[in-house]
């Protein structure tokens, strides 16, 4: 896959992502990225483990990017709660619940897309409702995520996200982020 004269690769290894994330946030935010064996989850520090954990699924680089994006969105109070205090309705949502799910996913997935481009890694929006009663409108959701990416590029990327983007760019030797790197997919015209 090629985006704005950049060849996208899937050869990144999850340990690279762990190392980059930890170098950015382990000391200042007492937070580490952890390869999990099951479902992703955010766990604040507790009596047994003295640091916060962003746990991603099965060593999947894409899962790591997605879970990081939720951590980047979460404010200080939310980062003290398991899974940031959010209620998650699993796959199988009805139309109303799916709409609410997508509303809260726009900003995290926009930040995830920024991170993916900085890491030269492919990004795909996730409507995450494979067995629901309703087929999500993936194109409409992708348009919303794309619009949020453009807002971030025009108005500024939040500080923690910007810090990680710069670390990813440095490691993967990618150019500064620009609107051209986030093409409007042909099927959305």
Image (cartoon, rainbow, N blue to C red):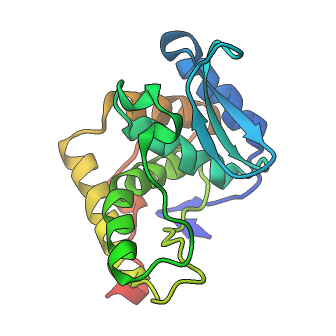
Label count reads 0
Q: Quadrant of the C terminus?
A: bottom left
Residue 175 is at least partly visible in this image:
no
Residue 8 is at least partly visible in this image:
yes
Residue at x 56% of width, y 10% of height: 27
Residue at x 77% of width, y 51% of height: 38
Residue 158 quadrant: top left
> Residue 92 in the image: x percent, y percent?
54, 78
* Of the pair 29 and 111, the residue shown nearer to us: 29
> Residue 168 in the image: x percent, y percent?
56, 35
> Residue 75 in the image: x percent, y percent?
34, 30
The answer to whether 185 is drawn above or below residue 55 in the figure is: below
* Of the pair 178 and 13, the residue shown nearer to us: 13
* Of the pair 77 and 7, the residue shown nearer to us: 77
Residue at x 75% of width, y 42% of height: 14
The answer to whether 27 is drawn above or below residue 170 in the figure is: above
């Amino acid at each position: 896959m090629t985006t704005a004269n950049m060849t996208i690769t899937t050869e990144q290894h999850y340990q690279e992502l762990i190392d980059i994330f930890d170098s950015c946030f382990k000391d200042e935010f007492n937070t580490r990225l952890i390869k999990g064996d099951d479902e992703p989850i955010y766990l604040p520090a507790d009596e047994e483990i003295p640091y916060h954990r962003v746990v991603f699924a099965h060593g999947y680089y894409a899962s790591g990017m997605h879970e990081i994006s939720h951590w980047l969105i979460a404010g200080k109070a939310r980062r003290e709660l398991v899974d940031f205090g959010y209620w998650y309705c699993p796959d199988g949502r009805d139309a109303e619940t799916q709409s609410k799910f997508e509303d809260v996913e726009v900003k995290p997935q926009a930040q995830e897309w920024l991170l993916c481009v900085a890491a030269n890694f492919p990004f795909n929006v996730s409507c995450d409702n494979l067995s629901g009663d309703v087929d999500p409108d993936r194109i409409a959701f992708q348009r919303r995520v794309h619009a949020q990416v453009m807002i971030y590029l025009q108005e500024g990327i939040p500080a923690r996200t910007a810090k990680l983007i710069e670390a990813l760019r440095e490691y993967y030797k990618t150019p500064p982020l620009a609107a051209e790197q986030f093409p409007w997919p042909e099927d959305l015209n």
